[in-house]
Amino acid sequence: MDWLTILIPLTLTVIVIWLVATYNNLVALKNRYKNAFAQIEVQLKRRHDLIPNLVETARAYMAHESSTLEAVVAARNEATAALSALKSGGSVATLADAESVLQSALGKLTVTMEAYPDLKASANMQQLTEELTSTENRVAFARQGYNDSVLSYNTYRQAFPAILVAARFGHSADAELLVFADSAAIQEAPKVSF
């Protein structure tokens, strides 16, 4: 009977320690992916803030390209709205779609700007373009960090034995990866022909 009086409290202590450790790990991993998304949000806001300056600088040189400029502004506004909506229950997929549309509109603007040598030579435009390129790199880096954090959280939450208690601790759903429309294109090997 003596060994039973030691074994039962010891077993209960081990279970409580495991439950506390599992809960703390779930919370820490969830906070990491939320922080990683906050880093993406900072870079997306930076990009969204740069675009009006870029459009205004280009507008002076590209008066008859107003449809291209309007498409960039509309895409920027949609992406900004999707980012704001995410805080009130919007989906990561909607944000990714809006950012893809914005990226496409910016690509068209860049191609259109090639036809305007004075615009390309403008010091203000060069600075804005460099800042936008730098921001795009930061967005890509932040997106990678976010997706890595989401993967860690989802893997831990789905793995045994954490899956036994994760739902009871409020961690019943996987976190959503942030996949932009260009993800499929990035995965493809470039085709080169001579």
Image: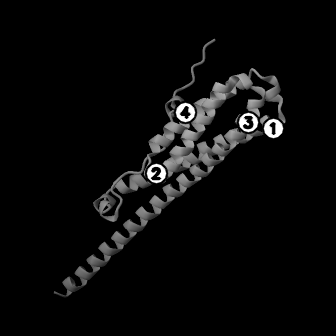
Q: Residues within 10 Å of mark 4 (few under 14, many from 20)?
A: many
Q: Find disc 3 in the rendering and name its residue.
A: 56
Secondary structure under badge 3? helix
Residue 156 spot, x, y in % from top left: 39, 56
Secondary structure under badge 2? helix
Q: Find disc 4 in the rendering and name its residue.
A: 101
Determine which quarter of the picture holds residue 110. Answer: top right
- Of the two numbered discs 2 and 3 on the same chain, state the one appearing first in sequence: 3
Say which mark, if any, is on residue 124: 1
- Of the two numbered discs 1 and 2 on the same chain, state the one appearing first in sequence: 1
Q: Residue furthest top?
A: 194
Q: Nearer the viewer, residue 46 or 5?
A: 46
* CA gap, disc 4 and disc 1: 25 Å
Write the residue at 53% across / 32% down. 182
Determine which quarter of the picture holds residue 112. Answer: top right
* CA gap, disc 2 and disc 3: 37 Å
Residue 173 spot, x, y in % from top left: 35, 53
Q: Nearer the viewer, mark 1 or mark 2?
A: 1
* CA gap, disc 1 and disc 2: 38 Å
Name the kind of residue labelled 1 in the image: Asn
Write the residue at 63% across / 11% down. 194
Answer yes or no: do the residues labelled 3 and 4 have beta carbons within 8 Å?
no
Name the colour scheme: one colour
* CA gap, disc 2 and disc 4: 24 Å
Say which mark, if any, is on residue 150: 2
Name the kind of residue labelled 4 in the image: Val
